[in-house]
Image (cartoon, grey):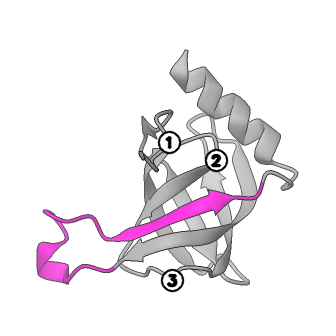
Amino acid sequence: MEKRNKNRQIRRLPVQYGKTAYDHEAFTSNISPTGLFLRTMAAFPSGTRVQVRLTLPDGRVLELAGAIMWARKTAPQLAESMKSGMGVRLDPSAPAYAAYLEFVKGMAG
């Protein structure tokens, strides 16, 4: 059974994230209606709750929340060939989630 969402879009967007504050920076590698992959060397363990501040190409900033579903830490010397980062499942109850969904739908069409 395929676990990955087929609606993933490759997109590099700047992100700030953290457990209680936006104290880390990263970029998305791909996004989907339910979540995103953060490419970072500062990955949190699976199950960790995070806040995500996503900056869209038009300058809008969306503040979202979610949980780490999986994480992969790669040695720095392998960072170019193996993606280090984490998959974040976003909370659909976050106030900015509707705007996020509109952005993702607009990319697909």
Looking at the picture, which amino acid does disc 1 mark? Answer: Asn
Front residue of 96/35: it is: 35
Tell me the CA gap for discs 1 and 2: 8 Å
* Label 1 vs label 2, nearer the camera: 1
Could you say whether the residue bearing mark 3 is in a helix, strand or loop?
A: loop
- Does the magenta portion include 95? no
Tell me the CA gap for discs 1 and 3: 22 Å
**Farthest residue toward the top?**
109
Horizontal arrangement in the rendering, residue 21 relative to residue 109 (left or right): right
Q: Give the class, few, some or many, for how many residues have Cα within 10 Å of label 1's Cα (few <14, many ≥20).
A: few
| Whole-percent x, y for residue 18 in the image | 63, 78
Front residue of 102/13: it is: 102
Looking at the picture, which amino acid does disc 3 mark? Answer: Phe
- Name the residue located 64 percent from the left edge and 47 percent from the top edge: 34
Read off the residue under disc 1. Answer: 5
Say above or below: 90 vs 58. Answer: below
Q: Earlier in the sequence, mark 1 or mark 3?
A: 1
Q: Give the class, few, some or many, for how many residues have Cα within 10 Å of label 2's Cα (few <14, many ≥20).
A: some
Marks 1/2 in contact by CB < 8 Å: the verdict is yes
- Using the image, tell me which numbered label, if any, was put on residue 34: 2
Say above or below: 74 vs 103. Answer: below
Q: Which of marks 1 and 2 is nearer the N terminus?
A: 1
| Whole-percent x, y for residue 42 in the image | 42, 81
Looking at the picture, which amino acid does disc 2 mark? Answer: Thr
Front residue of 43/53: it is: 43
Residue 109 quadrant: top right
- Using the image, tell me which numbered label, if any, was put on residue 44: 3
Horizontal arrangement in the rendering, residue 65 relative to residue 67 (left or right): right
Say above or below: 30 vs 70. Answer: above
Bounds of the magenta span?
73-91
